[in-house]
């Protein structure tokens, strides 16, 4: 399979391809790295990416950032960061991918643990992750051409512990290998409309 991975150079992106790259051709894309450049918040940029990539059998999206901070101090513009970047960025790719991925292919988005195990300063991340998961569940019943769509919802990755120090008290970090297997399940398996949790 030719698998387009948007955000392939990031921590989650590297985990996503950990297992899949052993058997498949990975086509990498990102804002500042990878074989192709793309701004997922720009519909024209996303369309240009798919045109440049040619035939694709599966798409994985691991991009997007949200705002971490106390909800009582959060501004609407800070809240919109997660909406515009992680939520709409991933949905922009998914909606475009539906028209380009080959028959029987798959689309895999990435949410995260914060909408099912709430943390302080995580209201923005929780709502964005929840929206991604619900989009996947609802979109799955309308997918054409035997396409499938799922999301992977990883816990705090071992490689991200230092970056998010203090935000996830009591969370057991998950290894990249286990996260990678969740993406393998989404791409190579038969699931559709599922949120694959990695805790």
Image (spheres, rainbow, N blue to C red):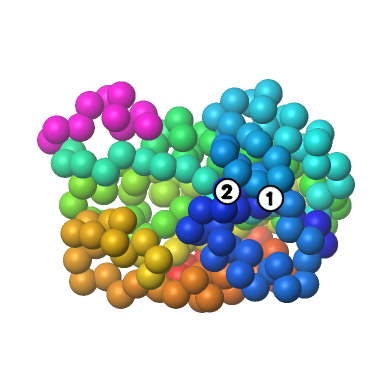
Residue at 67% from the left image edge and 27% from the top image edge? 45
Which residue matches tag 1?
A: 28
- Is 1 within the magenta? no
Report x, y in % for residue 42: 59, 26
**Please, what secondary structure does the residue beneath circle 2 have?**
loop
Q: Nearer the viewer, residue 176 or 198?
A: 176
Residue at 86% from the left image edge and 47% from the top image edge? 55
Residue at 16% from the left image edge and 41% from the top image edge? 70
Of the two numbered discs 2 and 1 on the same chain, state the one appearing first in sequence: 2
The quadrant the C terminus occupies is bottom left
Instruction: Using the image, determine if residue 48 lies above or below residue 137.
Output: above
Query: Mostly what secondary structure, the magenta segment?
Result: helix
Instruction: Using the image, determine if residue 39 lies above or below residue 153.
Output: above
Which residue matches tag 2?
A: 7
Q: Is residue 91 visible?
A: no
The magenta-colored residue range is 72-81
Judge from the rendering whether residue 2 lies leftward or rightward of residue 9; answer left or right: right
């Amino acid at each position: 399979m030719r698998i387009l991975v948007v955000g392939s150079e990031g921590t989650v992106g590297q985990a996503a391809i950990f297992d899949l790259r052993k058997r498949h051709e990975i086509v990498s894309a990102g804002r500042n790295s990878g074989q192709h450049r793309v701004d997922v918040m720009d519909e024209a940029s996303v369309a240009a990416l798919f045109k440049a990539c040619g035939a694709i059998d599966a798409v994985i999206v691991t991009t997007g950032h949200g705002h971490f901070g106390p909800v009582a101090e959060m501004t609407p513009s800070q809240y919109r960061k997660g909406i515009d970047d992680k939520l709409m960025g991933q949905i922009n790719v998914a909606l475009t991918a539906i028209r380009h991925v080959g028959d029987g292919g798959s689309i895999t988005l990435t949410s995260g643990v914060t909408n099912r195990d709430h943390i302080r300063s995580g209201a923005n991340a929780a709502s964005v992750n929840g929206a991604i998961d619900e989009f996947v569940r609802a979109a799955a019943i309308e997918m054409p051409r035997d396409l499938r769509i799922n999301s992977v919802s990883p816990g705090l990755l071992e490689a991200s512990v230092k970056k998010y120090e203090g935000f996830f008290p009591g969370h057991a970090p998950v290894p990249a290998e286990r996260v990678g297997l969740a993406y393998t399940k989404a791409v190579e398996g038969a699931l559709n409309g599922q949120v694959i949790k990695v805790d």
